[in-house]
């Protein structure tokens, strides 16, 4: 077998066909990028430096108030508080990248959603401003020129909804006002599909859609499987059916523990899961044993084994997992979250070199 292109390799992995090696991709915190490029000699083009198989493009903006300039409403030495276009206030750290902390959400009732947010999300006159056609076109061209797998990425309905009303209100309302939450999920699902239609009709298709929806936290899902099926599943399936009708693969990023939801997510249309967060209770080998014949996986390699920049720790983690999960030809090497700046550039290079060495197939 000849050496495959990134696009050929990922397509084979998604179809459980034998590639030349496992796939390779990664996510990084922004301050990792700055540290490696400015202080450790890394090329600013990570795709070039690491020869990743995938090119991602983010181009959908469903912030309600498109013209609202985020306002810093408070700050101290370490953090600042930002009011955004969804009437939400989030706390962000100045000295390191992390997920922003929820502080306040002004949209705390169904009435405010219907008055202030929903009309803007549904406003078709705003659609062309909600899609970054130029960015998509440029990334698609780059992917074609470099023969990489091209994914159109966007936040999912769960992420958009909690970005407006917060996790606490959203999860509580799933119990006390499920019709409101269903309306929010489907409103965002319809908007996502309409924006994708507009984008794809003008600029052409990607190889896959990649949705980001975090459905769990540490050792538990945010909702029961029954509640997922009743409230979240219809919106997910609406989006995934659109992709499947275009013969596109569906990749799903999901942080936290979501194992109890996997069967329903497969039924909704997911082809590959990314992240598979070990510290949240996800076990790549356990999930692979049950679902490896029908799903592909990207991640599940504990990023904490890189924190000490110790090659022996990295070897132990990779040697335990990759020889097993490569067996059904459905694996892409990736950490179980994102690479932080305490991991050295040289350590990460060793990590991927070791992963590829273990994940290369006999081509005879």
Image (tube, helix red, strand yellow):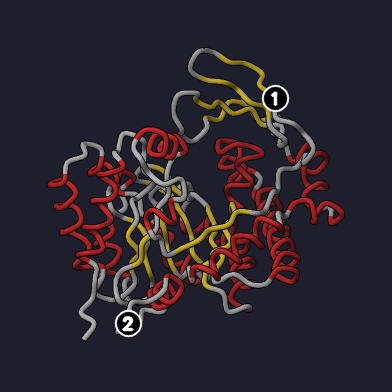
- Can you say whether 274 is above or below 40 in the image? below
The extreme right residue here reads 125
Distance in Å between CA atoms under marks 2 and 1 = 53 Å
Is residue 251 toward the left or the right of residue 316 in the image?
right
SS of the residue under disc 2: loop
Q: According to the image, label 2 marks what residue?
A: 2
| Crowd around label 1: few <14 · some 14–19 · many ≥20 (10 Å) | few
Q: Is residue 110 left or right of residue 309?
A: right
- Residue designated by label 1: 71
User: Where in the figure is residue 247, as x and y percent of width and height?
Assistant: 58, 79
- For mark 1, give the secondary structure: strand
Q: Residue 334's image quarter?
A: bottom left
Mark 2 Cα shell of 10 Å, populated few (<14), some (14-19), many (≥20): few
Question: Residue at coordinates 33% horizontally, 51% vertically from top-left?
Answer: 335
**x then y, percent, for residue 216:** 44, 47
Residue drawn at 71 percent across, 32 percent down: 87
């Amino acid at each position: 077998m000849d050496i495959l292109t990134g696009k050929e390799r990922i397509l084979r992995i998604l179809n459980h066909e034998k590639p030349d090696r496992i796939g390779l991709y990664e996510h990084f915190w922004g301050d990792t990028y700055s540290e490696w490029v400015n202080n450790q000699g890394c090329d600013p083009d990570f795709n070039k430096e690491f020869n990743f198989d995938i090119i991602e493009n983010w181009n959908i903006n469903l912030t309600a108030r498109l013209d609202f300039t985020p306002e810093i409403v408070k700050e101290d030495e370490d953090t600042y508080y930002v009011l955004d276009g969804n009437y939400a206030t989030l706390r962000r750290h100045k000295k390191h990248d992390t997920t922003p902390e929820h502080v306040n959400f002004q949209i705390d009732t169904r009435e405010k959603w219907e008055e202030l947010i929903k009309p803007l999300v549904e406003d078709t006159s705003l659609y062309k401003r909600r899609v970054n056609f130029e960015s998509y076109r440029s990334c698609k061209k780059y992917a074609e020129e470099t023969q990489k797998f091209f994914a159109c990425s966007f936040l999912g309905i769960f992420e958009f909804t909690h970005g407006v009303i917060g996790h606490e209100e959203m999860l509580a309302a799933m119990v006390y006002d499920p019709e409101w939450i269903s309306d929010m999920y489907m409103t965002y699902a319809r908007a996502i599909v309409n924006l994708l239609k507009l984008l794809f009709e003008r600029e052409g298709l990607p190889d896959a859609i990649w949705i980001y929806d975090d459905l769990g936290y540490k050792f538990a899902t945010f909702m029961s499987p029954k509640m997922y099926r009743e409230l979240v599943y219809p919106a997910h399936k609406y989006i995934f059916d659109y992709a499947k009708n275009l013969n596109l693969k569906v990749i799903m990023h999901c942080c936290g523990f979501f194992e109890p939801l996997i069967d329903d997510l497969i039924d909704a249309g997911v082809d590959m899961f990314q992240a598979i967060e070990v510290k949240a209770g996800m076990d790549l080998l356990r999930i692979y044993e049950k679902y490896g014949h029908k799903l592909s996986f990207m991640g599940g390699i504990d990023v904490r084994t890189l924190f000490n920049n110790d090659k022996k720790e990295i070897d132990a983690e990779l040697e335990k997992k990759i020889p097993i999960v490569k067996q059904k030809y459905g694996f892409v090497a990736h950490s179980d979250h994102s690479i932080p700046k305490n991991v050295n550039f040289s350590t990460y290079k060793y990590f991927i070199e070791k992963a590829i060495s273990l994940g290369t197939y006999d081509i005879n």
